[in-house]
Amino acid sequence: MATEAFEDIVADFEFLDDWEDRYRFVIDAGKAMDPLDDAFKVPATKVDGCASQVWLHPKIEGGVFSFEGDSDALIVRGLIAVLRALYNDLPVAQVAGVDAPGELARLGLNDHLSAQRSNGLRAMIERIRDVAASA
């Protein structure tokens, strides 16, 4: 169960021949995101467990989940963009049902991220699920 935006990323990845191109794609996706307003870069939105600075600002409006995010690391900003494609605009009740590790495996991310980045990615997914579950 992936969003259309995430399926677009999967399709784009199929056309990229090597991981360096995919890595650049992820970084470019992060660069294309609007920066998170500094007012939301507070301890309450900071994600623990990430090697870099990461903030996620979730919103639930009309039963629909979305979030904005930012990081001081380019690749992590890109991973936030990928997670936004995976989760944004889902009904909040469906967020917990997303098999994020399985969906991200379709991109081959698991094989090309350092252990620290993988831990940070898991921490971001946990934060997203926790917010949705408490809604």
Image (cartoon, grey):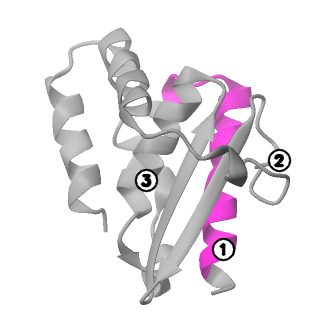
Tell me where residue 120 appears, x and y as whole percent.
Answer: 70, 40
Relative side of 75 to 124, left or right: left
Residue at image location 78% in from the left, 29% down from the top:
51
Relative side of 126 to 19, left or right: right
Residue at image location 48% in from the left, 74% down from the top:
95
Mark nearer the N terminus (2 vs 1): 2
What count of labels does the image hold? 3
Tell me the tag on residue 48: 2
Check disc 1 and give the amino acid type. Val
Mark nearer the N terminus (2 vs 3): 2
Give the residue at mark 1. 131
Tell me the tag on residue 84: 3
Cα distance between the residues tagged 1 and 3:
14 Å
Q: Nearer the viewer, residue 68 or 126?
A: 68
Cα distance between the residues tagged 2 and 3:
18 Å
Instruction: Rate crowding at label 3 as few (under 14), some (14 to 19) or many (20 or more) other CA atoms within 10 Å.
Output: some
Q: Compared with residue 41, is residue 89 higher up or lower down, i.e. above or below? A: below
Residue 82's quadrant in the figure?
top left
* Element at label 1: helix
Tell me where residue 22 appears, x and y as whole percent.
Answer: 33, 21
Mark nearer the N terminus (1 vs 3): 3
Residue at image location 57% in from the left, 48% down from the top:
69
Residue 59's quadrant in the figure?
bottom right
Check disc 3 and give the amino acid type. Arg
Magenta segment, which residues?
A: 110-132
| Prevailing secondary structure of the magenta residues | helix
Residue at image location 76% in from the left, 49% down from the top:
47
